Image (cartoon, grey):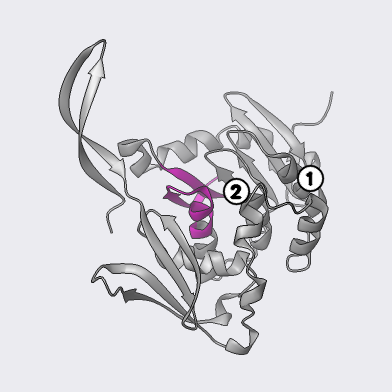
Amino acid sequence: MATSSESSITRNRSGDSVEERDHVACEEPLEIRVEGNSVAIVMRTPGNDEELTAGFLLSEGIVLDRRDIFEISQCPSQAGEQGNVIDVLLTDSSRLDLAALTRNVFTSSSCGICGKATIESVFQRFPPVTGDFRVAAESILKFPQTLRAAQATFERTGGLHASALIDASGEMSVLREDVGRHNALDKVIGYALMNDLLPLSEHSLMLSGRISFELVQKALSAGIPVVVGISAPSSLAVEFARESGQALVGFLRGASMNIYAGAGRISGAEKA
């Protein structure tokens, strides 16, 4: 599937205009069905749809590991377009609780649900991370360069978010791009789920943009102890990371970073 396409544009510089062709990131709807029930429609960049779906199911608590998924398959739509509907069959469909799906609650900043209630509802499904995994501050400073070097579609379009897993040695395990931040992370988590890599207890997560509550709780669903982003976290993301035992690093730029939670997991960043 194409992740970008060419479009005619008028480029204006210093008052002079010229007709050119430029690459833009692809965005298409994907309907996710579970046992024939429509559970979500996401606007995503086509590609790695099975991973996106698997990651979504894990972060929503519908599945716990790879064995819970019997099959993920692409379905042709009635309009004749291939690949915009995906259906999931569960190994044990009796566990399916459609009422428990919470994506709209967690992504809406105006939902009216307080942070404490929201955090407690997540902890009912995902326990806080444990273990003593630590990552060196010196290694974290290299994450943005590692991420940027692998963003092939962003290089063409400038219009995609990215999520990447960095292992304990500082090597990137997987990177995924998407027009949606949560989609990019779902693809990464789905990759880990489908390859039996969970929990990701010795990995860091690198994000290309700001860090929302939803992204931190998705990381928790995969057991990720360190979440790093180049931009700012939200207040609820900070509170959630502190409650969950995760390290949360934001404004990672140049030789500086802000550690909002879990400073004990960042070696070499101790207070003077």
Seen at 58% across and 87% down, the residue is: 93
Percent coordinates x, y for residue 241 in the rendering: 75, 48
Give residue 12's position: percent from left, percent from top. 24, 19
Quarter the C terminus occupies = top right
Kind of element beneath mark 2: strand
Figure disc tally: 2
Tag 1: amino acid: Glu
User: Eyeballing the image, is 268 above or below 131?
Assistant: above
Q: Which residue is mark 1?
A: 239
Counting residues from the start of the chain, the first of labels 2 and 1 encountered is 2
Can residue 48 be seen at all in this image of the molecule? no
Observer-nearest of 141 and 160: 160
User: Residue 128, how many percent across, how many down?
Assistant: 78, 59
Answer few, some or many: residues within 10 Å of disc 1's Cα (few below 14, many 20 plus, some between 14 and 19): some
Decide: is 137 above or below 45.
above
User: Identity of the amino acid at label 2?
Assistant: Leu
The residue lying furthest to the top in this view is: 14
Residue 174 is covered by the magenta coloring: yes
State the residue position of label 2: 205
Residue 7 in the image: x percent, y percent? 21, 40
- Label annotation for residue 272: none
Identify which residue, 116 or 153, lies in the foreground. Answer: 116
Q: Residues within 10 Å of mark 2 (few under 14, many from 20)?
A: many
Residues at marks 2 and 1, CA–CA distance in whole angstroms: 18 Å
Up/down of 133 relative to 58, above or below: above
